[in-house]
Amino acid sequence: MATSWINTNTSKRLGADLRQAVHALKECRSDFRELKAVMETMIDGSDYSLLETELGLATGQGQTAYNLVSGALTDMEDANINQTVIRLG
């Protein structure tokens, strides 16, 4: 298999910026994975009241908040994101 790693020169400002952005993306994705997993332990069927309490959400907003986190994580699991993290990380 051909090498696909892209080396960046972090002594250059833009190289360092790129590495920082990729690192932030990787950390953000990890945070969303963890947050979604914890949120799922607070949902009982269609009852989101514990999730709403723990996140400080208004009553009735738990499912919407969960769906937004879940959707954002789905977007961050995209093949382009994965390749960016793997090849430039």
Image: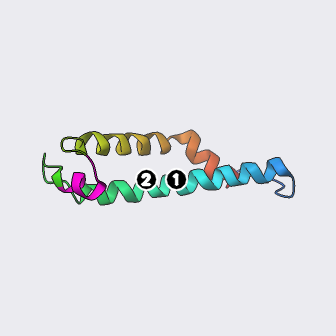
Quick one: 3 or 21, which is closer to the camera? 21
For disc 2, the neighbor class at 10 Å (few under 14, some 14 to 19, many from 20) is some
Give the left or right position of residue 61, taking residue 72 as reference: left
Residue type at mark 2? Phe
Q: Residue at x 49, y 52 (%)?
A: 29
Q: Is 21 one of the magenta-colored residues?
A: no
Relative depth, front residue between 59 and 41: 59
Q: How many marks?
A: 2
Q: Is residue 76 visible?
A: yes
Q: Position of residue 27 (x, y in %)?
A: 55, 57
At which x and y percent is residue 50?
19, 57
Q: Which residue is mark 1?
A: 28
| Secondary element type, mark 1 | helix
Would you say residue 52 sits in the magenta stretch?
yes
Q: Tell me the CA gap for discs 1 and 2.
A: 6 Å
Do the numbered discs 1 and 2 sit on residues whose CB atoms are within 8 Å? Answer: yes
Residue 49 in the image: state x and y as whole percent. Answer: 16, 52
**Colour setting:** rainbow
**Amino acid at the residue labelled 1:** Cys
SS of the residue under disc 2: helix
Q: Quarter of the image containing the C terminus? A: bottom right
Q: Which residues are magenta?
A: 50-57
Residue 2 visible from this viewpoint? no
User: Who's the residue at 48% across and 57% down the image?
Assistant: 30
3 or 40, nearer to the observer:
40
Q: Could you tell me which residue is drawn at 18 percent across and 49 percent down? A: 48
Q: Give the image location of residue 24, x and y in percent.
A: 60, 54
Residue 61's quadrant in the figure? Answer: top left
**In this picture, is 33 found above or below 61?**
below
Disc number placed over residue 69 in the picture, else none: none
- Residue found 37% across the figure and 45% down from its top: 69
To which residue does mark 2 refer? 32
